Image (cartoon, rainbow, N blue to C red):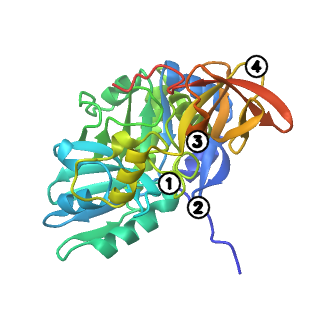
Amino acid sequence: MTDTPLRTSPLHESHRALGASFAPFGGWEMPIQYTGGGVVAEHTAVRESVGVFDVSHLGKALVAGPGAAEFVNACLSNDLNRIAPGKAQYTLCCTETGGVVDDLIAYLVSPEEVFLVPNASNTAKVVELLVAAAPEGVTVTGQHDGFAVLAVQGPKSAEVLAELGLPTDMDYMAFADAPWNGTTVRICRTGYTGEHGYELVPAWDDAPALWARLLEVAATHGGRACGLGARDTLRTEMGYPLHGQDLSLDISPVQAGSGWAVGWKKAAFWGREALSAERAAGPARKLFGLRALERGVPRAGMVVLSAGEKVGETTSGTFSPTLQTGIALALLDTAAGLAPGAEVTLDVRGRSLRCEIVKPPFVDTHVR
């Protein structure tokens, strides 16, 4: 039995030319960082100027047909009726027991068309579940290799796009389709960094030319190509969850503090009864932020202690280049009665690391 080969983005050779180091992620071989700076330099570029990411490993799926938006709304957690066509929405695909199959972005094109962007490793499952539930006349089509996704993030991101003749004046979570270089690119005011930014969705084969031009212009603004290493440190500083760590089949949106992405008043969505019951009763554990009070870097899976007793476990952890200290997300037992401002310790390979409980984000957000 052989392992399934890792998939690669349409920019793979471009990454090699930039001296990228690669690692497996969600079944794909993706750039983690580039020569000439590394994670900290790439992270800082996004916070201070602009960074350009290849996130083409993200899934793509199209739900189309009469009542497509109504169908999606009866399946996924958030309420599509809260937004109008031309807007995007963060939402969750849950199980009937309240676990999270995936978190994703839904682009509402029209009542008859919804474009979905799930996480790489979960795309097939999300599509499978929607196909099985789709009513007659509604089609669900996986388009993973049909489109690339490029993220342009940072305070100078709008300037970069403007120099390419692309629209930048849409509201947060709004999108537009625009011509570029003889093709059409979808531009959305979204991102995973906490900075003003955009995600561009070109056709797969059109991505290399767009990537090259974005990097050329970004360089004139002090920007650079950024890998998934900086993407992780940036999202952790914002307290954004990573599926498989901070959200999962075993970590519900109620526990993870993602209840804002649930349309509680909707008549139906997958997991509604279980999640409503957990919300009413109160979750047994909740996701908090931890900020190290001394030298040390938290990682996922570390035991959290209070007065020598285990009260939880970290789900994500890293060194914050912005704060110059260790930070983490952790699921803490609600029975322990802990709240922001309290001090706990982490067991870091047998060494105690003092941390303060905080409410994310760890740094100011500038998404709007």
The residue tagged 2 is: 27
Q: Earlier in the sequence, mark 1 or mark 4?
A: 1
Q: Are marks 1 and 4 in contact (CB under 8 Å)?
A: no
| Residue 227 visible from this viewpoint | no
| Cβ atoms at labels 4 and 3 below 8 Å apart | no
* Viewer-nearest of discs 4 and 2: 4
Indicate the amino acid at tag 1: His
Query: Which mark is nearer the camera, 4 or 3?
Result: 4
* Residues at circles 1 and 3 in contact by the CB criterion of under 8 Å: no
What amino acid is labelled 2 in the image?
Answer: Gly
**Closer-to-camera residue (368/272):** 272
Q: Which residue is mark 3?
A: 228
Helix, strand or loop under label 3: helix
Residue 175 coordinates in the image, percent (x, y) = 25, 40
Q: Marks 1 and 2: in contact by CB < 8 Å?
A: yes
Q: Earlier in the sequence, mark 1 or mark 3?
A: 1
Query: Would residue 79 be found to the left or right of residue 212 on screen?
Result: left
Image x and y of residue 261, in percent: 35, 43
